Amino acid sequence: GKIHDTLKPLFFTDIQRELWHAHWQHSIVEVAFDHGFIVVGEHRQAMNELEIELVEGQLDDLMDLAQTLQQCWQLEAIEVSK
């Protein structure tokens, strides 16, 4: 339609996701690593995100894994639920 023809993207992303299921202590955790770029006009910004989610087990195990990963790679923790 007419509106669609006038719309132009403000930015786009070029992101790949790698996904694993890991056994940590007594739990199963899904680990997702997103990496790539966000592009706005001529500007390109790298984007890396490591997401962990408890699949089965104890929340304490998930928090222990988060702390371990944060210490190993100096990650910034953001508590967000989708």
Image (cartoon, grey):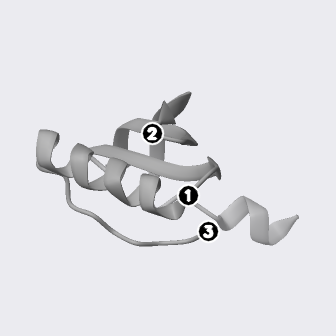
Quadrant of the image containing the N terminus: bottom right
Find residue 13 and name its label: none
> Dot 3 corresponds to which residue?
82
**x, y percent for residue 66:** 33, 53
- Residue placed most toward the observer, 34 or 4: 34
**x, y percent for residue 72:** 14, 39
> Dot 2 corresponds to which residue?
25
Using the numbered discs, state the Cα–Cα distance from disc 3 to disc 2 in whole angstroms.
25 Å
Hey, what amino acid is under mark 3?
A: Lys
Hey, what amino acid is under mark 1?
A: Gln
Dot 3 falls on a residue whose secondary structure is loop
- Residue placed most toward the observer, 24 or 49: 24
Q: Residue furthest right?
A: 1
Residue sitting at x 77%, y 71%: 3
Judge left or right: residue 45 versus residue 9: left
Q: Which mark is first along the chain, 2 or 1?
A: 2
Query: Are dots 1 and 2 in contact, CB under 8 Å?
Result: yes
Dot 2 falls on a residue whose secondary structure is loop
**x, y percent for residue 10:** 46, 62
Marks 3 and 2: which is nearer the front?
2
**Residue 29 placement: quadrant:** top right
Using the numbered discs, state the Cα–Cα distance from disc 1 to disc 3 in whole angstroms.
19 Å
Marks 1 and 3: which is nearer the front?
1
Find residue 58 and name its label: 1
Hey, what amino acid is under mark 2?
A: Gln
Question: Is residue 29 among the parts visible in the rendering?
Answer: yes
